[in-house]
Image (cartoon, rainbow, N blue to C red):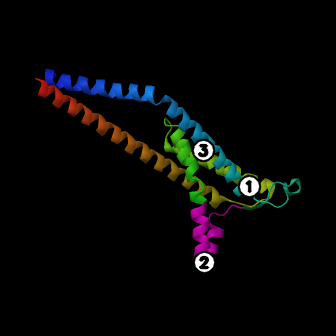
Amino acid sequence: MIRDDNADILYCLIQKIAWRYRERDILNSDTKKTIKWLMNVVFLVYLLMLLRMTVFRNGFVDSDVFSNGSLNLVPFSDLIRIANNDMGVFIYLALGNIVVFMPFGFFIAWYEKNVGLAVVTLWGFFLSLGIELSQYVFGTGVTEIDDIILNTLGCLLGGIIERAIYYLYLKKQRKEAETDVRLDEEEKNIEN
């Protein structure tokens, strides 16, 4: 059986947490909507820039459709060749493919809190696959399996970063709630 002091503490803790969430929802609902709207706009701009950078590098010309695309299905063959010739270019290409997809993973993880990192990674895989196939169709680049692998890895890393930030935020919120409960207990003890 729970002692009365422990029950009071538990009740105060639950009440304090419920009050904080209710207060945050009431006071910050407009702020939350604004942040979500801004994130959506930033994400849309990011996607447009990503497509411009990867698929429509030189603009869109009808005559290029299905005419200049090339395909490389051997993982990392070009990157290994490039690494042997110029390590700087290798790092630029490899890290670039990872870093350019990190915002996508971050946004998907931020927007869809109830999905796991596997789903976030799948989103990245399918976006990368779509971009690579578009490069082939529009003849704007080399469609490479290693780009898909590195882009998907970047998406996963972006999702991990978002989840780490989110869990650190939750940990901070819990710590603040525990501190508030302790202060309430001390005030209650002082009054008695």
Q: CA distance from mark 1 to mark 3?
A: 18 Å
Q: Mark 2 is on which residue type?
A: Asn
Q: Is residue 142 left or right of residue 119?
A: right
User: At 75% across and 56% down in the image, what residue appears?
Assistant: 135
Q: Is residue 3 something one can see in this rendering?
A: no
Residue at which label 3 appears: 123
Nearer the observer, disc 1 or disc 2? 1
Dot 3 crowding, Cα within 10 Å, few <14, some 14–19, many 20+: some
Q: CA distance from mark 3 to mark 2?
A: 32 Å
* Badge 3 or badge 2: first in the primary sequence: 2
| Mark 3, secondary structure of its residue | helix
Residue at which label 2 appears: 84
Q: Is residue 159 magenta?
A: no
Above or below residue 101? Residue 171 is above
User: At 59% across and 53% down in the image, what residue appears?
Assistant: 101
User: At 75% across and 52% down in the image, what residue appears?
Assistant: 134
Q: Mark 1 is on which residue type?
A: Val
Q: Mark 3 is on which residue type?
A: Trp
Range of residues picked out in magenta: 72-96
Residue 55, disc: 1
